[in-house]
């Protein structure tokens, strides 16, 4: 009969399969996975390693209660603009169309964490008086986020540097042409800010032609109590 050949082939395959399953169980293997492999003809994909969890603004760990999570990134050369993130909200970025050459500043209410204003100040061709008028009337407790882009220092005068020192900066007095700088300070701060980085413009160590590498800084800032605000 014509079916004898196909039936014999099926019987042989079943016998081989059952023998495989039996041998696997004797040797301690997983018979279910063996059967699955036998009938599907595919191998199971290895399980991917879990990615490290990222928290607010990309931090590697969550901030304590009553703290603001932030990340400040300076510009890269004169090509990629800076970025300021606070509580997963992008306050300053090229996508927001609110970055400019020089100093990019975001003002935040130190009690509520609410964004008050953002502005950039051209420190190459601009007027430093605009920066002074912006910083002088700040209210006590106002948080000041700063990210440099291209050149943050050429137009800075002694008065502007003093104002940043009063906000907690220690690096601003040495800030020079095309340095990279990120800083978070506050009006009325009693001590120097722990949130500051500066990368000096040096042809011997610059990452880009004429500019140092971009800086990236993150952390957790405690909110002020209403009685302090």
Image (cartoon, rainbow, N blue to C red):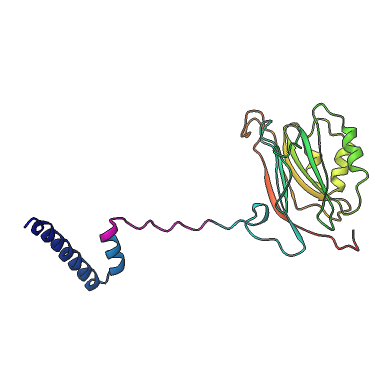
Q: Which residues are magenta?
A: 39-51
Residue 60 among magenta residues = no
Q: Residue furthest top?
A: 125
Q: Nearer the viewer, residue 217 or 65?
A: 65
Please tell me which residue lies in front, 197 or 149: 149
Name the spot of residue 106 as percent of width and height, x first.
80, 45
The spot of residue 82 in percent (x, y) is 71, 39
x, y (%) of residue 209? 63, 28
User: What residue appears at the point 88 percent right and 62 percent down from the top-left corner?
Assistant: 226
Identify the residue at horizontal 71%, vertical 54% (top origin). 219
- Looking at the picture, tell me which residue is in the foreground, 88 or 13: 13
Residue 162 at x, y percent in the picture: 88, 42
Residue lying at the far right in this picture: please name it: 137
Rendering quarter of residue 80: top right
- What residue sits 74% from the left and 38% below the top? 148
Residue at 67% in and 55% down: 56
Q: Quadrant of the N terminus?
A: bottom left
């Amino acid at each position: 009969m014509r079916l004898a050949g196909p039936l014999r082939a099926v019987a042989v395959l079943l016998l081989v399969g059952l023998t495989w399953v039996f041998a696997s169980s004797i040797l301690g293997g997983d018979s279910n996975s063996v059967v699955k492999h036998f009938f599907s003809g595919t191998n199971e994909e290895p399980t991917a390693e879990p990615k490290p969890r990222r928290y607010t603004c990309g931090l590697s760990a969550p901030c304590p209660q009553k703290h603001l999570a932030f990340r400040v990134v300076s510009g890269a050369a004169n090509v990629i603009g800076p970025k300021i993130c606070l509580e997963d909200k992008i306050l300053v970025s090229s996508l927001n169309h609110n970055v400019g050459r020089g100093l990019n500043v975001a003002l935040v209410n130190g009690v509520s964490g609410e964004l008050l204003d953002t502005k950039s100040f051209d420190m190459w061709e601009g007027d430093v008086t605009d920066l002074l008028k912006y910083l002088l009337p700040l209210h006590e407790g106002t948080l000041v986020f700063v990210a440099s882009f291209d050149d943050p220092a050429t137009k800075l005068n002694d008065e502007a540097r003093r104002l940043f020192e009063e906000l907690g900066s220690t690096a601003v007095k040495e800030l020079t042409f095309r340095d990279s700088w990120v800083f978070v300070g506050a009006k009325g701060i009693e001590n120097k800010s722990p949130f500051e980085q500066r990368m000096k413009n040096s042809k011997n160590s610059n990452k880009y032609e004429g500019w140092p590498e971009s800086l990236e800084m993150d952390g957790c800032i405690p909110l002020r109590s209403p009685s302090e605000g």
